[in-house]
Amino acid sequence: MSETISNSDLDAILTSASSSSSSSSTTTTALFNSLSSDFRKTTPKSYRNSGCDCWVSSSSSHFKQIQHDENDESAEIRMQNETTSYARLKNVVGRSGVTVNGIALHHASDTLLQVAGSSIIVSSAAGHDKFEGHLISQTKQQFTCVAVTACGRYAATGETGHQPAVRLWQLRDDQGNFVGRLVRSMQAHTISITIVRFTPDDSTLISIGCQHDAQIITWDWRSGHDLGIGKLMSPVNALTISFDSSMCVTVGSKSVKYWFLPLASDGLNKRTGLTSRSAILADKRNVNFVDATFCDATNRMVAVTSSGELLEFNGNKKYVKCYSWKESGDFKAICIAKIPEGLLVGCSDGLVRLFCLIGEDLDFLADLAPPTHLFQDPSNVYETQQLQSHPEDAIFPEPRCLVASSSSPTFVVGYADRSLIEFARENKSWSFRRASLGHTGSVNCIEPFPSSSPCLPAGTLITGGSDGTIRFWNFSGDSEDKKEIANILCPSLLKVVYLDENPDLLLDKRNLESVGPSNEDHQSASPSGVLCTRVTHDGRMMIAGTATGMLYLIDLSFSDTPIIDVINAHDNDVTSIDFSDHATTSSHDQPMFLASGGRDRFVHVFRRVPYSSQFVHCAVLDGHQAAIKSIKFASNNGQLHLYTAATDRSLIIWKLNSFSDQHSEFTRVQQLSVPSSIGDMTFIKYVDMFVVGGHDRMLRQFDINGKPVREVKGTDDDVAHSGKIHKIAIDHSGSYAISVCSDKYVYVVDLRTGGCLAVLCGFGAPPTDATFTDDFKNVVVTTSNGAIFVWQLAKNLTERMISAQVRLMEEVTMRTSTPDSLLGSGSETISGDSSSFARPLGAPEFSGSSASLYSDDDDSTRFSSSGEYFFVFQNGSGTS
């Protein structure tokens, strides 16, 4: 069925927009503005109607309840303008996977679209990170594919999950401003949609379902009506469309089938069967085909097989020639694409080869090596010449997809390590345009680097992934400190530390018969690689815990970040680690301690050898009966304490009684029990309080002695009907908390009142960790699908946290010289509701406004204006 949310006037706008010229753009804009002005109504944040069942959010803001008439087809358009957003998605790093169907490139405007969970990244190629906008799904279902029209104003997406829909989005208006508005949703597929594609003349949209759906559907995307439906007999791996838009070809397992496309102008307003014809494969009828492309207007086509051969088909749909490199054994073909100069072939040795299509045979012209190789540190790439020089033993990731156009020399190559690199072929030479790098697989943890350390620029973040790497990021823009160490390959990625020499961890497994999202295997697998990290207070040393129970001690004071020591501490997962120098008032006459907790329920304590970087084992704590979730050092009355929390619903406080060169004694001083299993525990900086997040979605605050102080909700009950909190983060002022929940949402809540200020979504997979940046401007979320989401907080929310921290630091300074009996302890200070927090927070304020796809403005215009993204939820599940 097709769900059309626009009225007849809006349909007229869509029809005229796709074929608009410069003479009609003014009229179209005026008509659209007159229609949308009726919908620009705001709803107070406090509005709640218990009888309603529809939720709306803008840019994953705070969800609020509004009246919704299911028969009103314009309800979604009205709802997108209603917002109480205290957070906006600023940029996304990484992606769910690299497939030819998950990437789209509009060559005229140099706009790149790529899938990242339940979000689509829309970025400009006019330099590094000049612009970035986002399309966020109104459901928790993951996007699987994306396509863009030839005019560049509209995009289509496919998704996986219950009742997946083909969704049509408006990308920009007549002035080139980014809009990101959902136009309509078209439902006809089941389980998963693997491919969406517009015809070259923008007349028809084609969607293909997974092998269980087994449908190919053609749509009149302007009206939302389907033009024809075909039945698929085998899974489809790729789709290619002829130059004249009269036919398309699907290739897959033992299948090459030509489909003749109906046109919207034919007046077909009801479903009809699509006419198809199978190619004549001769002795290749049992081959699995993985990619294909038309070469010219005569319908000459080339297809790639899973064995690495190229098969050529003539205009009569007959297989006529086979190209193979099996005799040399050097490489095999993986993917292909057409550019004006010839045929691009991605090969298994990592190279992209260009072949001439003039004549009957494919003649080799040139090859292109990737600018990166496995185990390369991007911090060492600071000159253009280094992109072309590699070590003799370098291992190149194989290209998994080529996204190109027969009318543009610009093309994008997606590699097996999830790197995405854009090139251009002009004047018989290759030119590097830009690159996007990220983790391969789940990003398990994130930690802000100490701002007081001189080793790295302020605002640096550390992430650990299942690919066995630790990556240092900085998203703070073009700061002077960052310019000194920025590389030309990926400026936001400062450095990569590799803990495992196995190259397979850095590569995605190849899936030739995709039935869903490309990262399905990564999500279902258990955590691997780096699970947790911790940096010393001075930023000179870091410890990383892995899924194999190993602890890696890394020296950050040197540019090459050497691994000092490797400690075999646990039988399996290391779940939490901490250094004692983070204790607020740790005594200087004590050595530095390192503690690690694991899934084997043990806590191991190590003592640093004086005048050395080595740590020796000194104690084992086995007070818990289940997996350790969090461990933290803290100082209480000048004595070092260790706080451990586990899934057995217990929290134990240990005190360091004595220590020597060979042994250290920790005794249990108190054991607390909480009503539900513990997901995480963290301390509030500068305040003698800690917060525990549980599976009942509550945040429980305790003072340093374990006395309960306050209990607030860690999620928004209007949104969270299931799930559990497994990670929490507190800003330095102790004002707000981030709750990472297994329901695929992240919540920003007020620790004093429990009020939810923002619900962050669009991840498409369970988020794994989150943190505030040191400047309180952003919330950074890591996910299990490999993407990192950077959310910008409202200015008034940031200003409140800054003022609270300033006031807190003044009180801490006074307490150092005044007895607590006179001024009150830190927990009493933070628990009191100050006058500034008693005042309403007010409407969210953001710098910047709606940005243009061609804008060269600063970072303040990289996010979209309010009302650009909206999400609808009914009875806890997505609906459109």
Image (cartoon, rainbow, N blue to C red):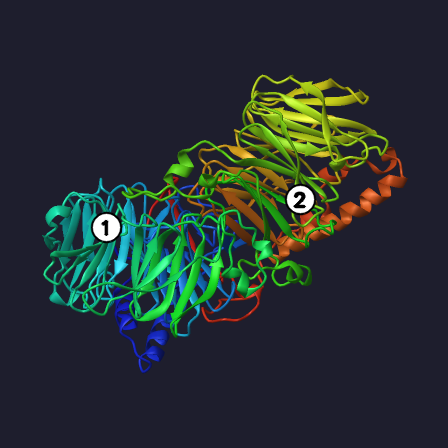
* Label of residue 73 in the image: none
Q: Amino acid under label 1?
A: Ile
In the rendered image, residue 861, in percent from the top left (x then y), is placed at 53, 65
Work out which residue is located at the far front of the displayed protein and give it: 328
* Label of residue 208 in the image: 1
In the rendered image, residue 599, in percent from the top left (x then y), is placed at 55, 24
Residue 673 occupies which quadrant of the picture?
top right
Mark 2 vs mark 1, foreground winner is 1
Q: Nearer the viewer, residue 577 or 19?
A: 577
In the rendered image, residue 366, in percent from the top left (x then y), is placed at 36, 64
Residue 78 occupies which quadrant of the picture?
bottom left
Neighbour class for label 2 at 10 Å: few (<14), some, many (≥20)? many
First along the sequence among labels 2 and 1: 1
* Left or right relative to 108: residue 133: right
* Left or right relative to 512: residue 576: right
Work out which residue is located at the far bottom of the displayed protein and give it: 23
Neighbour class for label 1 at 10 Å: few (<14), some, many (≥20)? many
Relative height, residue 865 to residue 237 (above, below): below
User: Residue under circle 2?
Assistant: 735
In the rendered image, residue 833, in percent from the top left (x then y), is placed at 71, 42
* Left or right relative to 42: residue 576: right
Q: Nearer the viewer, residue 675 or 468?
A: 468
Residue 316 seen by the camera: yes
Between the C-alphas of marks 2 and 1, the distance is 48 Å
Please report the residue visible at 62 percent of the width from the left and 63 percent of the height from the top.
478
Circle 2 SS class: loop
Relative height, residue 237 to residue 405 (above, below): above
Circle 1 SS class: strand
Please report the residue visible at 42 percent of the width from the left and 72 percent of the height from the top.
176
Q: Nearer the viewer, residue 194 or 317?
A: 317
